[in-house]
Image (cartoon, rainbow, N blue to C red):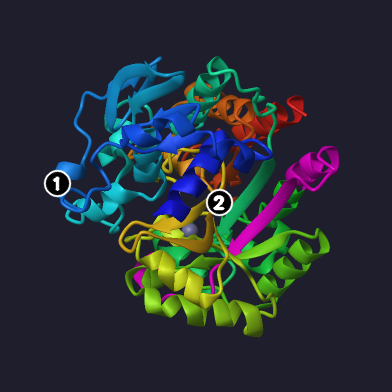
Amino acid sequence: MNRIINYLLRFLLGVERASAYCGMIGYTSNPNFFKRYKLVIIPSRFFDADIYGTADSLPRLPLVEIEGVPILFGSARQDEMEGTRIVYADIIASAYFLMTRYEEIQHRDIRDEHGRFPGRESLPFKAGFIHRPVIEEYGQLLRRWLRQAGVEIEEPKPMFRKIWLTHDVDAPFFCRSVRNVLRETFRGGGFVQACKYFAGPLRRDPYYTFPWMLKQDQAVKEVYKDGRCEVVYFLKAGGHGKYDRPHYWLRSPDVHALLELLKSKQVSFGLHTSYHAGEQPSLIASEKETLDHVWNLGPVSMNRHHYLSLREPEDFDKLIRAGITDDFTMGYADVSGFRLGTCRPVKWINPITRQMTSLTLHPLALMDSSLSDPKYMGLDAQEALSYSQALLHTIYLHGGEAVLLWHNTSFSSLAPQRYHRQLYMDLLETILSKK
Ligand SMILES: [Zn+2]
């Protein structure tokens, strides 16, 4: 546990040379050790052997607040002993709880129809802070307490440490196969229109919005020339369930054309783990193999699950074993915000084994359908813009990563919600304005 506590402290401190400050902070309830430190955080009982993993380990609502910040464990009490400040707000256990998704192993029975833990069931949503990366606020508290104890420590500079413009390719084309023509003939816009899409140039296909997307993203990359902006396309390479349709294959000339276009713009590629592999995580490795060696895009190191249906925390292990180093799945489909309690990338700590791992989790802050789908947030254009801009501004203030996910289909003239083109342009403009 010492390694984890040290990692959490450095993460909370969030500044260069964080390790130099760690020695000034104690995480102990033993008064004999207090005088070694400038600041002591008294551990709650969360990590105790008779509490951890039991129902008693779960925070109780309403949460205690300290200096306006909700804490999951401990109390607002503060003492001073021979020059050492002693706080009872257990921000270490609170951060651990949030960034490991501990509550998902405690609530195995709570999953939606796609096997996902719903955002609306999460503690951050129920406690009303899903839009706040409270781990960053714990960092602010920690640095403030240190300063009050006479330690000089700076605040992280407001900035986007990284901008990830990401796109999951679920359905690259609307009507480019005989199967699509049949579908449109019997259930869609009719045979004539279907044939126009099928036989016409690829760029006229309503879902083929990639040239437009690449142009928008390129404008941000050109301004953030220092490599802080990365464009990632997550591609499917398997899956047989109904939620994995439509399947697209490398041998299709249209897919080939799409790949050539994406490669010519120097985008990065990641694995879009199929819904099927979400159900059977042992399939993840073979899907990655396909992308690496059949599609010849490898080795890919980034992943996002289709439908965000990474069901159980153990599934991260399968990603690691398949050779994935960076995952971008950690957002909620039903509500945009901070699923990990932070807007910075974290090393995944396995809450079952309590081991640090090599996998980096990148918090997914904004997804198109979360904002607009009536099943999810159902926001209108103005509401979606305001909510998203507020999240981006929060990420910027804390020096975090802006991870955006917009699908090519959302920019289509056939999209159920038509505001996404304008919304996406406005959000990229917001990002550019903060350079
Ligand atoms: Zn998908």
Determine the residue positioned at 35% across, 49% down.
101
Instruction: Please tell me in which quadrant of the rendered image residue 63 appears.
Output: top left
Quadrant of the frame with the N terminus = bottom left
Residues at circles 1 and 2 in contact by the CB criterion of under 8 Å: no
Q: Which residue is nearer to you in this view: 280 or 261?
A: 280
Instruction: Please tell me in which quadrant of the rendered image residue 421 appears.
Output: top right
Instruction: Name the amino acid, label 1.
Output: Ala
431 left or right of 180 in image: right
Magenta segment: 215-244
- Locate residue 307, reporting x and y percent: 41, 56
Determine the residue positioned at 40% across, 72% down.
277
Circle number at residue 409: 2
Quadrant of the frame with the C terminus = top right
Q: Which residue is nearer to you in this view: 289 or 195?
A: 289
Determine the residue positioned at 42% across, 79% down.
283
SS under mark 1 = helix
Q: Which residue is nearer to you in this view: 338 or 317?
A: 317
Q: Residues within 10 Å of mark 1 (few under 14, many from 20)?
A: few
With respect to residue 432, does 22 lie above or below? below
119 part of magenta stretch: no
Q: Is mark 1 within 8 Å of ligand 1?
A: no
Q: Which residue is nearer to you in this view: 313 or 24?
A: 24
